Amino acid sequence: MKCSVYIATSADGYIATIDGAVDWLHSAGNPEADMVENPDMGFGAFMASVDCMIMGRKCMETISGMNLSPEQWPYGDIHIVVLSNTLTTPPENLKDKVEMFSGDIVDLLKELENKGFNQAYIDGGTTITSFLNHSLIDEMTITRAPVLLGGGIPLFGQLDNQIKLVNSEAVAFPNDFIQVKYKVNYL
């Protein structure tokens, strides 16, 4: 199964503030920029390329805390699995949207493949790091927001080995966000 990352960070590499807030994403960048050509910076096209999503518990809790309306829900009807060794049921507002999983991620990928899924969207810093440590991420798209948080939750945790990123493609958006896409090459 192909596993892809699509995530935003601050320019200094944080995915959230120390308390888990991501509201800085909405205030970063040039709000006057003409984003008509690519208003979502490729997110819709990326979502059209995946058929399931795997996220960590903290990521799910952040999304749950946003109390998104059905119109605001960014993931459509994609199959979402949440990794957690502590929770067995999702928050009430996500009960019909996510499935909880506790166990080995390699087994999870096999299970998803057996159900006919082909490409997974991997989200959440701890989850991404775990997938990288298992050599399971194939490509990463990282969008840097033009803001320095000075601290927070970093995108990557402790990696077991160096990982080479290859075939980079970069685009600068009119709103001052910069997006880089990499293929992952495990050394």
Image (cartoon, rainbow, N blue to C red):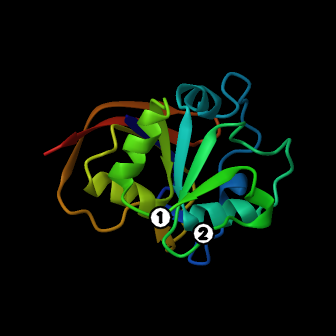
**Which residue type does callout 1 highlight?**
Ser
Which quarter of the image is occupied by the N terminus?
top left
- Give percent across and percent down for residue 176: 59, 42
**Nearer-the-camera pick, 86 or 60:** 86
Determine which quarter of the picture holds residue 60.
bottom right
Position in image of residue 66 (x %, y %): 77, 61
Residue 144 in view, yes or no: no
**Foreground of the two, 71 or 87:** 87
Tell me the residue that label 2 is attached to. Answer: 88
Labelled pair 1, 2 in contact (Cβ < 8 Å): yes
Q: Is residue 84 left or right of residue 66?
A: left
Name the residue carrying label 1. 102
Check disc 2 and report its element: helix, strand or loop: loop
Residue 91 visible here: yes
How far is the residue under mark 1 from the one under mark 2?
A: 8 Å
Is residue 180 positioned above or below 169 on the image?
below
